[in-house]
Image: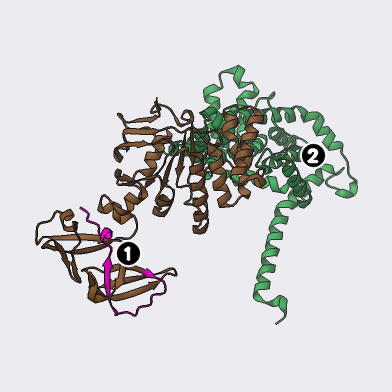
Amino acid sequence: MRLEAVPVTLSRCAKTFRGQRVLEPVDLSIEPGETLVLLGPSGCGKTTTLRLIAGLEKPDAGGRVSFGADDVTALPIERRQVGMVFQNYALFPNLTVRGNVGYGLRIQKVEASAARRRVDELLEMTELTAHADKPITELSGGQRQRVALARALAPRPRVLLLDEPLTALDARLRETLRAEMNALLRELRVTSIYVTHDQSEAMALADRIVVMSAGRIEQCGTPREIYYQPASRAVAQFIGTLNRVAGECRDNAFVTLGGTISVTGLVAQLRARDGARSEIFFRPEDAVLVDPQAAQLRGAVESALFLGERTRLKIRDAAPGALIVDVPGRVELAEGTAVGISVRDEGWVALH
Amino acid sequence: MPEFLRPRRLLVAGQLLLTLALVAFMVVPVVMSVMAGLTVNYFRGVSSGLTLKWLDQVWAMYQGSVWLSIEIALATLAITLAIGVPAAYALARSNTRWARFVEELLVLPIALPGLATALALLSVYGGWSAFRSSMWFIVAGHVVFTLPFMVRSVAAVCAGTDLRTMEEGAASLGASFAQRFLTIVLPNARPGIVAGALAVLTLSIGEFNLTWMLHTPDTKTLPVGLADAYASMRLEVGSAYTILFLLMTLPLLIAMQWLGLDPAGAQSSRAAAKRKRALSRSSAPGQQPLTHPVETAR
């Protein structure tokens, strides 16, 4: 069941509420069929951006929203042909599951038998056929979420908009539905814009992620780019855990408390004078424990947190601040054990 | 210590007794009044025999009032629905200070004695004799008095359900404002509308203060007739009038309550089953709906 894929373009879209700028002018283009995730902490402007695309908000003067060649800036949501899934689903308690899924078709006066076929198709796709005639109040959270999705897809929207659709569910269900949703979005190839504050959700679903903070786009890229080549400290710290190693550049190497790191090109990336204080970063999973004699950094175990599949070590004395290193779950180290850490070359990140 | 003398038991027994006593205090006069309307001679008691003579007499004399009251109540209901539901919706959707102010302002007619409202209406429109002598004069008074009950009841339901997001959902599916209002807002506000309608009907039929001031010999409603009957006729006739009153209002209230019991209009079979269950459960079907207007009035 493929849907027609339309590109979406925002140009110079800003939003001011009661004199307060919540969204700085944003330029964004979303490829046809792409799943774009808007990621960021609450209040970063991601939901506002989504509502601008939906037509639930109008951009400040000068902003423009287009679906393909159509300039939809002046159109209200009901004339934009979007499908939207809301955080609390916004289902209609006065209608059954079937009534909810078929609502858009009823409004568009689709002929009854065609509408029924379409609803049946969607109910089957979302595995809701058995619940078709139940009222919404008798469904579980996961089922409601699927009704919301089926309802949004029924009228064959040009663009699918999802506003934290999984946030209201518990963790286990969220993971299952995330996988289902991913498969569905790949299959439909409908242009989708997905808002979340959950970075693992963003990683799993996105073709591209847009990281936002304080009403601005911080970075836009594939999940791998965002994770491994964060553009700024704000992005790096929002996504995953990042260790900070403070020290200084000396003779093309980086010297810190627990050792010297001489990785080709790293100091050059820092653009710091010889002898200047600077910082480099690495992710916990890019480090391995090695013999202290051959290690980049030497320190001692401050604490070890057993998490099942891995053990998260906190290491002191290797850098001015404590470092977090992930090792396999079976590794058992007593507090105070002397350890050596090495980080693979591409694991070192220089940020400005 | 014997089981029934334990402090907890005593407390429960005491509460039960007090409740029963209070219920009796309120129910006994109603029962007595009903009985009075059915006995041949109240002063000689039930031993004088039971009769429907008084009821018959009341019906013959006050039929007109019964129909008039029903007409006025329905007209009042129609107007409060037409004005009150959209107003409540607008108030619930609006977050401005003005909306809260208007909401408070609407309650004024309840806080004001009915006599004062009536006097105001009389002094302004009293000279317009076509209006003054028609039933619409009383309808106007009743609308002023009952509108807040409709608005409050509907606004409470609108504020309780997340109407705004639901409407956004409907809009995203292509529904225009009118379509959203008809297919989403109204059905979901239904419990509030039914409760409000219930309040308006009972208040309108039972209203005396205001109506007594506004009525003319040609526009005598039920309660005004009741006062008449109490003042100028035998006690048995007045009591029979009470019975007539109850006979009129109770079925109305029960019917309205049943309508409200069914939240999803589509599932008529489920609703019917629920209705059946409700019937067999409630031994005194009149009691339940009667509490409703009191709740909504708060």
Q: Name the element at disc 1.
A: helix
Q: Nearer the viewer, residue B255 or B272?
A: B272
Image quadrant assignment for residue A329: bottom left
Q: How is the image coloured?
A: by chain
Q: Is B221 on the left-hand or right-hand side of A267?
A: right
- Label 2 chain ID: B
Q: Residues within 10 Å of mark 1 (few under 14, many from 20)?
A: many
* Circle number at residue A40: none
Give the residues in magenta: A327-352
Across and down, in percent, residue A265 comes to 18, 56
Q: Is residue A329 magenta?
A: yes
Across and down, in percent, residue A348 comes to 25, 59
Kindly tell me whether residue A74 is visible in this rendering: yes
Same chain assignment for discs 1 and 2: no
Q: How many marks?
A: 2
Residue located beneath label 2 in the image? B240
Q: Which chain is green?
A: B
Residue located beneath label 1 in the image? A284
